[in-house]
Amino acid sequence: MPDKIRRMLPNPAPPDSARPPDSPEVEHASIGHVLRRNSIANTILALVAIAAALHYAQMVWIVIFISVLLAFILEPLVGMLEKIRIPRSWGAFIALLAVAAVLYGVSYIFYNRAVRFSQQLPKYAAEAHQYIDKYTEKARSLASSAKGATPESGKQTIQVTQQPSLWSEIGSGLGTATDIALAASFVPFLAYFMLTWKTHARRATVLLFPRDDRDTAYASLGSIADMIRAFIIGNFLVGLFNSAVSTAAFGVLGVPYFYFIGFISGFLSLVPYLGVLLAIIPPVLSGLGTLHGMDFLFILLTVLGLHLFSVNVLYPKFLGNRLRLNPLAVTLALLFWGWIWGAMGLILAIPMTAAMKVVFDHVKALNAFGVWLGE
């Protein structure tokens, strides 16, 4: 090709390897990679910081969430009182006073039943030991034979451990009870202010978001409120049904204090995954000495049948349209919140996870997480 024609043609772009290191394309790609890496690192650090804050300030968060649940429970009553021209502040006070009266009445009734039941515990414990000794006798004989077959060493070491004193145990227990009582005393006050300042709190929360996102925030708050209210009412109705059926079944079997045991067993069955085991323990302990093998089998079948009926029929009917969480998401939520907050985490795990799903469903950038949590 003549040199004149070669000079007229445009120069081809050099390959990436031939470009100088400081070219705009290479610099833009390296900056984008660094930004993405920093974004992932910041997200991980933020999640770790949130988990640490939830764990180390668990008492504060638990009090706040319990207060929120109580406010959602009492909101219909306060709204009804407001319709008959009772100020919202007085309506919230009346609602909380009614809750206190109900709790006092229920605790008084169950306290008397619990005292009578505890008076029979030595008898039940002795009968339980008779059943347990039958199954542990063989284990003891096996252990003694294994000990005889093991050669004994010439020297025997005696290890003495100092047991904590009674006063130290009482002091630590009183400290924990005092902390719990102090934290619980904030619940009615927080619930009262949440009820009386509901409109202001919701409007102020929406105003925290940019103008373009306020409609989404308002819709998300409304959906979360409906979900939590349906969750509480649904669980209460399912617990009442389980308690009624359990009380009737235990009464037919002749379980001592069946009206007390059936109520406890019915609501213990609501605990996710552990409900069956927890619901079986009260009637079994109460029936030791008075019931026999087939009776215990009937108790097991009753509790298991109620649990399966509640999970497969009652929960989808009352809560299916509100929660829509898949079993894997529920299991991971129970594992995480149980690790963070213990027993209270297991109770609050499902409503908090369902609230997170509501937020994910309303935020376009987070829809994929909502789909992952959904059915």
Image (tube, rainbow, N blue to C red):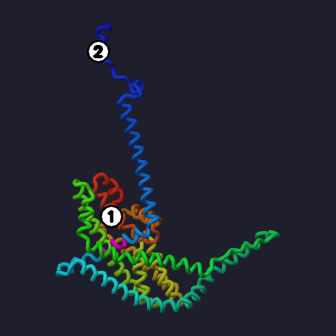
Q: Whole-percent x and y of residue 76?
A: 24, 76
- SS assignment for the magenta stretch, majority: helix
Image height check: is 102 above or below 224? below
- Residue 9: assigned label: 2
Which residue is located at x 29 percent, y 68 percent? 227
Asked whether the viewer can see residue 375, the reply is: no
Question: In this picture, which residue range is highlighted in magenta?
Answer: 65-71
Q: Whole-percent x and y of residue 112?
A: 44, 91
- Specify the amino acid type for callout 1: Ala
Left/right of residue 204 with respect to residue 342 in the rendered view: left
Quadrant in the rendering for residue 14: top left
Image height check: is 9 above or below 206? above
Task: Check if residue 107 falls in the magenta segment.
Answer: no
Q: Whole-percent x and y of residue 325?
A: 35, 63
- Specify the amino acid type for callout 2: Leu
Quadrant in the rendering for residue 133: bottom right
Q: Secondary structure at mark 2?
A: loop
Which residue is located at x 24 percent, y 58 percent? 216
Which residue is located at x 72 percent, y 76 percent? 144
Q: Whole-percent x and y of residue 109?
A: 40, 90
Q: Nearer the viewer, residue 52 or 345?
A: 52
Q: Secondary structure at mark 1?
A: helix
Considering only order in the chain, which callout, 2 or 1, is on the residue closer to the N terminus? 2
- Residue 355: assigned label: 1
Q: Nearer the viewer, residue 254 or 358?
A: 358
In the rendered view of the protein, which quadrant contains the C terminus? bottom left
Left/right of residue 115 with respect to residue 85 in the rendered view: right
Q: Residue furthest right?
A: 154
